[in-house]
Amino acid sequence: MLELINLRKAFNPGTINEKKALNGVSIKLEEGDFVTIIGGNGAGKSTTLNAIAGVWPVDEGAILINGQNVTGLSEHQRAKYIGRVFQDPMTGTAATMEIQENLALAARRGQKRSLRWGITRKEKEQYHELLKTLGLGLEDRMTSKVGLLSGGQRQALTLLMATLKKPQILLLDEHTAALDPKTAAKVLQLSDEIIAANHLTAMMVTHNMANAIEYGNRLIMMNDGRIIYDVKGEEKKHLTVDDLMKKFEEASGTTLNNDRMLLSKKG
Amino acid sequence: MDLLLSKLSTFGNALPGDITQGLIWGVLAIGVYLTYKILDFADLTVDGSLGLGGVVAVVLITNGVPVPVAMIIAFLAGCAAGLCTALLNTMLGIPGILAGILTQLALYSVYLDINGKANAPISIDKFPLVISSRYVTAGNEVIDIIRTVGTALIFVLLIIAALYWFFGTEYGMSIRSTGCNPAMSKAEGINTKVTTIITLSLSNGLVGLSGALLAQYQGFADVNMGRGAIVIGLAAVIIGMVLGEVILRKHFNFVGKLAFTAIGAIVYFVVLRIVMLIGLSTDNTKLFSALIVAIFLAVPYIQKSAKTSFRRAGKRSVSADASPTPEPVNAAGKEDK
């Protein structure tokens, strides 16, 4: 479904601030895989997702979605394959536009945008039903501007938008990190439900090791722009947070340096 | 008392002309609204594309091209000017404001290339112009005055209707999202460079059309007719938004915003007339426009800082804490105490 072959990316190359963010990332995802990604600060977790999404071109390597090489496609050209939810709730939605307009924009992801009316009556009914499933009461506020919603509501809406047109791959980039614990748990639960219901292939970066173990069928750990640990199936189910800490020290030779990850160890 | 009456009568006589002028500038202001408000792009091309539209229309009409055709070409000339700015910005990475300044400057030369000299007169006596200031002054038949104001109004209404349709389409919605959130727009598969190019072209096309109307209305195009036009356009947008918020409140929708942009332009010219009657000299009109825009842009900031400021926090803290407020010290100095 998704294959990354030896991805490399350096930021500010040739300057004193040079940062080799990806140092040969390779992974192959099967259809329906839900991969959680953990790692220290600057390990390359978000960078990997941004490489897949095409925020910038990679220096080396190839990105294949469904067997098709998308490495040379720009961000908006790749968008038809990819659904994304970002860390900042402000990033995924257009604040000055209505809830239903945001959904209508997302429903046309990857399609040519014509001079037909931007949102049809039938769509509005469909969105009304879909929003009901969130259980946030947004179905009665479809003409409200998204800027009026809370962070959690916006993330839930972004999730809906990212999956409205079934993506080949769903990228969740610490999408609950900016939310309070209760809302974060709810949005996470919702993500899991949506992924299961639509049989989506997904990658989720998280700083919460317990969540990384609890959700998904596969877990990868990154350090210094590489994948240092990759576990799936039964073995993953029986992991504990302490196992992960130990694995990290074994594989990287250092202790985990993600402050938020350590703080949320018990979470 | 006599003086007041005479000024009032001057004001009354000038009012239809001021409204017409406001509506013609309203076309420009709606163009500015598209870039400044919808795309979030401060586009200074406007100062050049107004004169360009004016001179293109005048030169074509005086060379025998039918007036409607000349106006369409003036619109397209404006589009081309906007396209230049957009390409400088999206393809060559030049910051938006600078890209607009470059195009605007180049357009002064283009104007002179088209016309050969700074002034391009056109007479209502020789050509079937769509609008002329001759018919709005006192002493004209009421029907002529109404016809002139009505012509300008029809242009504004048609443009509002067309834009309401366009921005409700799939493509128009992608332009709105580009201005609101470029990162999200790219993630939704929108080519934000193309939406920027289309919007800047459309906006300057409207400015070119406004120039074509203005040149006919005043009977000439001039190389300097666009100088400061962006400021008048911004003034109209800002005045319109403030009035619209106050009057329509919750119902201040997209059509309302476009309509109030044109109303903002009318208010601008009416207020300008009033301050001129009070004693502002014509030399100072640009100073006046700059002041209006500065004041309206500053008000939200001042309102915000009136609610929350260090000075006020300091005052409030006095009642909460009896100890004397220390002299401001830097972070290092605080540790020493």
Image (cartoon, coloured by chain):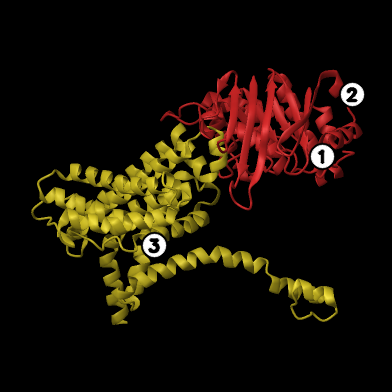
* Label 2: chain letter: A
Q: Which chain is red?
A: A
Q: Amino acid at mark 3?
A: Val
Q: Quote the CA–CA distance across marks 3 and 1.
A: 49 Å
**In the rendering, at what x and y percent does residue B70 appear?**
19, 45
Q: Residues within 10 Å of mark 1 (few under 14, many from 20)?
A: few
**In the rendering, at what x and y percent does residue B291 appear?**
43, 70
Residue carrying label 2: A238
In the image, residue B187 above or below residue B220: above
The answer to whether tags 1 and 2 share a subunit is yes
Q: SS class of the residue under badge 3?
A: helix
Q: Farthest left residue?
A: B126
Query: Quadrant where the N terminus of chain B lies?
Result: bottom left
Q: Residues within 10 Å of mark 2 (few under 14, many from 20)?
A: few
State the residue at coordinates (50%, 51%).
B248
Q: SS class of the residue under badge 1?
A: helix
Residue A23: image quadrant is: top right
Look at the image and tell me whether residue B169 can be seen: no
According to the rendering, which colour does chain B have? yellow
Question: Counting residues from the N terminus, which is met first, the one under dot 1 or under dot 2?
Answer: 1
Residue A263: image quadrant is: top right
* Tag 2–tag 3 contact (CB < 8 Å): no
Judge from the rendering whether residue B201 lies leftward or rightward of residue B247; answer left or right.
left
Residue carrying label 3: B231
State the residue at coordinates (25%, 51%).
B53
Q: SS class of the residue under badge 2?
A: loop
Between disc 2 and disc 3, the foreground one is 2
Query: Quadrant where the C terminus of chain B lies?
Result: bottom right
